[in-house]
Structure formats: C-alpha cells, structure tokens
Image (tube, helix red, strand yellow):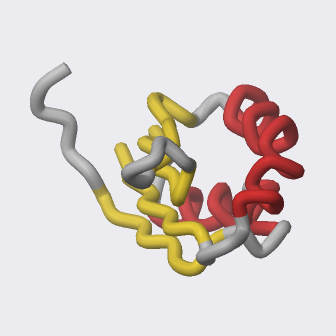
Amino acid sequence: MRVALICIDKPGHIETRKANRDAHLAYLSDTGVVEMAGPFLDDQGGMTGSLLVLDVPDLAAARAWAAGDPYAGAGLFQSVEIREWKKVIG
C-alpha cells in the first residue's frame, strides 16, 4: 500500500534539519520503501517540512518507518500526518 507522510517542521528548526539531513537521506535510501520524497519550501526557498510517499505493507509499517526517521528522532517535526494514498497519475 502507498502511504503519504506530511511532515511539518517546528518553526526555527532549520539547523536541526541541516544537522540530520545526511542521516535522513541515508535512511530513505537504506530502508527501500520510499517511492518519492522532498521538502516543502517557504517563499524564500527554505525547507519547512517534508512530503514522502512510502510503499509499505500497512499503516503500522508506515508509523514504524516514520518513528525511525532521524528527523523524527531529532525532534524536527511539529506534526506528522500519515495517510493512505492512491496513485492515479505518474
């Protein structure tokens, strides 16, 4: 099943994002379940959150994956929404 993670950064936490970015990107690559991912941007092009699409067996697996993300472990996110997602185009 495909699952979308909509993650919003805590305001003023860009240094937390930068400090954990390499570990986050390695996690995305190493876990093998990420179909697409990228940051949300503000009007100046600064990163303010993340959108990820995972291919996982169920929502429990998506929750476990999200909990293991180095960004989550560093306390970067203000909120994380996990929703089943259906691919229609692309």
> Where is residue 23 drawn, in percent x and y?
86, 41
Residue at x 52%, y 58% (from the top left corner): 49
Which quadrant holds residue 81? bottom left
Which quadrant holds residue 10? bottom right
Residue at x 50%, y 38% (from the top left corner): 38
Relative height, residue 83 to residue 75 (above, below):
above
Pick out the residue farthest to the top.
90
Q: For the image shown, how many numbered marks are present on the structure? A: 0
Viewer-nearest residue: 43 or 67? 43
Where does the N terminus fall, quadrant-wise?
A: top left
Residue at x 82%, y 68% (from the top left corner): 73
Relative height, residue 59 to residue 55 (above, below):
below
Give the left or right position of residue 36, taking residue 87 as reference.
Answer: right
Give the left or right position of residue 45, taking residue 16 as reference.
Answer: left
Viewer-nearest residue: 31 or 18? 18
Pick out the residue farthest to the left.
88
Pick out the residue farthest to the front.
44
Where does the C terminus fall, quadrant-wise?
A: top left
Give the left or right position of residue 54, taking residue 66 as reference.
Answer: left
> Where is residue 52 drawn, in percent x and y?
47, 45
> Where is residue 29 drawn, in percent x and y?
71, 27
> Where is residue 39 drawn, in percent x and y?
51, 44
The answer to whether residue 1 shows anywhere in this view is: no
Residue at x 20%, y 36% (from the top left corner): 87
The answer to whether residue 75 shows anywhere in this view is: yes
Give the left or right position of residue 26, taking residue 32 as reference.
Answer: right
Relative height, residue 7 to residue 77 (above, below):
above
Relative height, residue 48 to residue 22 (above, below):
below
